[in-house]
Image (spheres, grey):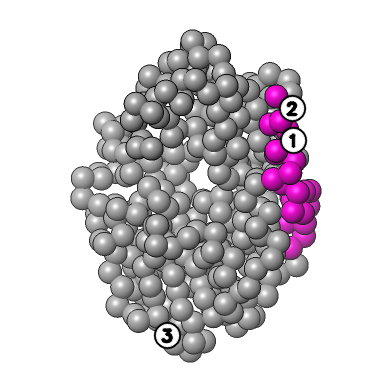
Amino acid sequence: MSYGSLRHWILYLTARVNISSQKGGKPNAAVCYALEVKGFLRNTRVFLQHGIIKDDMDWLHYENTKMTRFVTSTKREYRFLCDTFGYPEGAVIQTGLCRFDNLQQFTVKPRQILVMPTWRSWIATPTSASKAIEEVADFQQTTYYRCWNAFLNNPLLHRLLERYDMTLVFYPHRDMQRFLPDFTVCSERIRKAAWPEDDVQTLLKESAYLITDFSSIAMDFAYMKKRLMYYQFDVEDFRRGQYAEGYFSYERDGFGKVCYTQDEALEELTAAMEDGFANPAVYQERAQAFFDLHDDKNCERTYYAVKEL
């Protein structure tokens, strides 16, 4: 079935229950939004999610989705949505992300580092408001490109990879993948990974260490009790242009050290390599407290929650 095809429309309009991990994915975003939010389409809609919510995302508030059920994974996330997103009582449920079932067993490549930054909305989908943050017409002039490209080509990083016999996989968010050719890599130990050739969950499971920025995939990595680092060189722009902070503070609640400069990030990476990527106790304790559901029953709980409808 082709996206936006007649068959897609027929199935969308006639389905009694619509279950999706994405708010989008519908034949036409604008038309379907109007049909659902204005009450013309009265089917049951279940949002499985594709990551643990930690920020205040107004586009997922009840007034903008009218979802029948909204899946969450932890008590803190569940309470935040119940208190902030405006859903009717019983609409928000805590079952856990279905994909977490696959994180119970995995084999780690002890010499593989994964760098997986999230997207930037003002770059991925430029609008007139983008210029209030920075000029995005030339991607290579953006802070995102300059900071990540400089990190990938830092001589100290290359020496560390050689010294500890490591490889590094660079995999930007899917919405930033079209910019992947812009990044230059001058080390044979660094590989640019692309969708769909590389599977995100496979990379997360097999990597020994994660470097990300604001991505919720850090939750998956922490769920597997592995060490990670946040490299947040543009935190003010991110908060202003993408997501307002919610209940989760990276400094207070994060599952790894928060670095704001390239020097800090390389210093933390050096320490992690010297420790053999052993996860410090403070981050293990935070993960233990955060993930109150840690089993292989996420799909089962979600299935029965949907079946009840």
Q: Residues within 10 Å of mark 2 (few under 14, many from 20)?
A: few
> Is 8 placed above or below 292 here?
above
Q: Mark 2 is on which residue type?
A: Glu
- The secondary structure type at the circle numbered 3 is helix
Nearest the viewer among 10 and 94 is 10
Disc 3 residue type (three-letter)? Arg
Pointer 1 residue: 304
Q: Is residue 218 magenta?
A: no
- At a point 49% along the width and 82% down the height, the residue shown is 166
The image position of residue 135, as x and y in percent, is: 25, 44
Q: Amino acid at mark 1?
A: Tyr
- 133 lies left or right of 207: left
Element assignment for label 1: helix
- Secondary structure under tag 2 reads loop
Start-end of magenta stretch: 282-309
Q: Which residue is mark 3?
A: 159
Indicate the quadrant where residue 257 lies: bottom right
**Vertical placement of 132 versus 135: above or below?**
above
Percent across and percent down for residue 241 are 41, 38
Read off the residue under disc 2: 308
**Mark 2 or mark 3: which is in front?**
2
